[in-house]
Image (cartoon, helix red, strand yellow):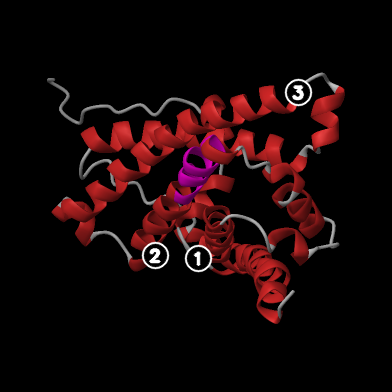
């Protein structure tokens, strides 16, 4: 195992996760007024509606799939009677559907941001970077799911999953990642890159769930024209 492997699969992930945590704390303490999604709905609605809906539903399903696949050990699913073949079929077809929805959504949003003049002018460098990174990481994940899993039935739960759990428990084993197919490696590296830029982009709005909205009083607008 080379020094590059140690950097990519031990040092680099912890660098990105450290920036993720420290960056959020710094951003919250110094830039709360810009802690927003910077909605551009008033500039263009039609493509935003479809792109945002597909992306958010798809990414939520992808997140659930990743939690189940990466954090739940293989022995646990087998103990519940879920065979390797059944799990593989669910991961491939379910993951492909969720991935296609997410790719379609981010493609619409990225196309909108590039081709709509008003949206493009109001977009920052970080907005474009996040859109491109998301498109790349989701695309690589879809290629890994469709292109490799369907052809060779690669079981990432014996390599990538224990490596991820090792990262989270501070017992990383870089050797688990050395023989992983390239699409999976690129998917993982790009995903950690997103963690690294997350605190400095509009992605911070993920943590601002507007729960107060549901119990907020209605805003009343009254005309100043007494004859109206």
Residue 194: tell me if it is visible: yes
Name the residue located 23 percent from the left edge and 42 percent from the top edge.
Answer: 42
Report how far apart the C-alphas of labels 1 and 3 lie in the structure: 42 Å
Query: Is 189 drawn above or below residue 225 in the view shown?
Result: below
What number is the disc on residue 200? 1
In the rendered image, residue 68, in percent from the top left (x then y), is placed at 70, 34
Report how far apart the C-alphas of labels 1 and 2 lie in the structure: 8 Å
Query: Is 4 drawn above or below residue 146 in the view shown?
Result: below
In the rendered image, residue 179, in percent from the top left (x then y), is placed at 67, 59
> Between 82 and 199, which is closer to the camera in this rendering?
82
The mark total stands at 3
Relative placement, left or right, of 225 versus 4 is left
Relative placement, left or right, of 155 versus 182 is right
Q: Residues within 10 Å of mark 2 (few under 14, many from 20)?
A: some
> Between 202 and 164, which is closer to the camera in this rendering?
164
From which residue to which does the magenta span run?
A: 140-150
Helix, strand or loop at disc 1?
helix
Relative placement, left or right, of 135 versus 121 is right
Report how far apart the C-alphas of labels 3 and 2 lie in the structure: 43 Å
Seen as rendered, the residue at the extreme bottom is 3
Helix, strand or loop at disc 2?
helix
Q: Are marks 1 and 2 in contact (CB under 8 Å)?
A: yes
> Between 32 and 195, which is closer to the camera in this rendering?
195
Name the residue located 75 percent from the left edge and 66 percent from the top edge.
Answer: 174
| Residue indicated by mark 2 | 126
| Residue indicated by mark 3 | 83
Name the residue located 52 percent from the left edge and 46 percent from the top edge.
Answer: 144
């Amino acid at each position: 195992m080379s020094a590059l492997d140690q950097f990519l699969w031990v040092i680099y992930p912890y660098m990105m996760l450290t920036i993720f945590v420290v960056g959020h704390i710094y951003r919250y303490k110094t830039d709360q007024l810009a802690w927003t999604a910077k909605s551009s709905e008033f500039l263009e609605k039609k493509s935003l509606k479809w792109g945002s809906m597909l992306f958010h539903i798809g990414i939520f399903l992808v997140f659930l799939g990743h939690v189940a696949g990466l954090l739940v050990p293989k022995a646990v699913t087998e103990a519940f009677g879920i065979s390797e073949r059944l799990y593989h079929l669910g991961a491939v077809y379910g993951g492909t559907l969720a991935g296609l929805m997410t790719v379609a959504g981010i493609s619409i949003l990225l196309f909108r941001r590039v081709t709509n003049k008003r949206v493009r002018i109001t977009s920052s460098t970080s907005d474009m970077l996040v859109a491109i990174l998301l498109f790349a990481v989701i695309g690589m994940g879809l290629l890994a799911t469709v292109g490799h899993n369907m052809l060779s039935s690669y079981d990432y739960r014996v390599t990538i999953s224990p490596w991820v759990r090792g990262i989270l428990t501070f017992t990383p084993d870089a050797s688990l990642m050395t023989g992983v197919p390239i699409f999976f490696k690129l998917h993982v590296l790009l995903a950690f890159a997103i963690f690294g830029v997350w605190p400095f982009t509009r992605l911070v709005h993920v943590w601002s769930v507007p729960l107060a909205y549901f119990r907020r009083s209605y805003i009343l607008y009254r005309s100043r024209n007494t004859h109206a």
